[in-house]
Image: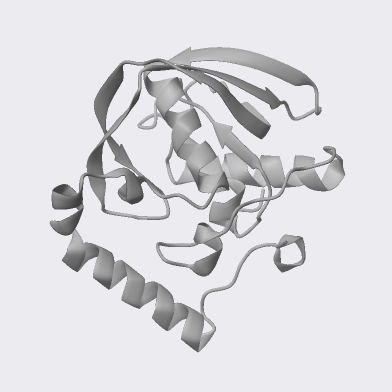
Amino acid sequence: MKKLKIIKYEHPLLRRKSRELKDAGPRERELISAMAHTMYAAPGCGLAAPQAGVLERLFVADIDYDRDDPNSERRLRVFINPEILWESDDDEPMKEGCLSIPGIEGEIFRPSRIRVRARDENFEPFELEAEELLARVIMHETDHLDGILFVDRMARLKRSLLTVKLGKLRRDTMYDLYTGREETNYPVLIA
């Protein structure tokens, strides 16, 4: 299985809004499979298509597997064209990280419960009520589809404490783009 390259902080594609998918054919199934493989290998609990350089409204998530045990049971969830229909009024803080922003974590306040509508890998519609970690992962990955990163949601003071680390990530990404070392996985799929 192909492992995808995850693009990093301040790559211009991470700030672009993704377009809706009209269906899920063989190309999309191949992308979903590659995204799942990449997420599990990282290891992470979610991966949005823009993180692989594909500006389409698609992400995969799995909060149930044990990231320390590669043989643990997996429960992959696929979200195509997700739309958050409802958010609870109560916000909870939780530490978040991101595969596109390695080495950075921060406390983010998000609603503790949500309702989301999306399509699965067969393009069948579904609605799901989620809470705690699953709700957070869905909101985090949906943010990616809108060009929003978790550090954008951090309190200004806490984010300012990360200025040096974020600056280094930005410089590394810009250097890789300038030298041509930063390539996307599916350049023909970029909107």
**Residue in the image at 45% along x and 49% along y:** 148
Vertical placement of residue 129 versus 179, above or below: above
Image quadrant in which you'd find residue 172: bottom left
**Residue in the image at 81% along x and 27% along y:** 122
Vertical placement of residue 24 versus 180, above or below: above
Image quadrant in which you'd find residue 89: top left
**Residue in the image at 77% along x and 42% along y:** 21
Image coordinates of residue 134 in percent, x first then y, are 45, 22
Residue furthest to the bottom: 179
Image coordinates of residue 81 in percent, x first then y, are 69, 35
Image coordinates of residue 188 in percent, x first then y, are 77, 66
On the question of residue 88 being in view, the answer is: yes
Image coordinates of residue 1 in percent, x first then y, are 67, 48
**Residue in the image at 45% along x and 79% along y:** 176
On the question of residue 70 being in view, the answer is: no
* Colouring convention used in this rendered image of the protein: one colour
Q: Left or right: where does residue 125 sit relative to residue 85?
A: right
Q: Left or right: where does residue 25 sit relative to residue 184?
A: right
Vertical placement of residue 114 versus 106, above or below: above
Residue furthest to the top: 129
Q: Quadrant of the C terminus?
A: bottom right
Vertical placement of residue 127 versus 16, above or below: above
Q: Left or right: where does residue 74 sit relative to residue 150?
A: right
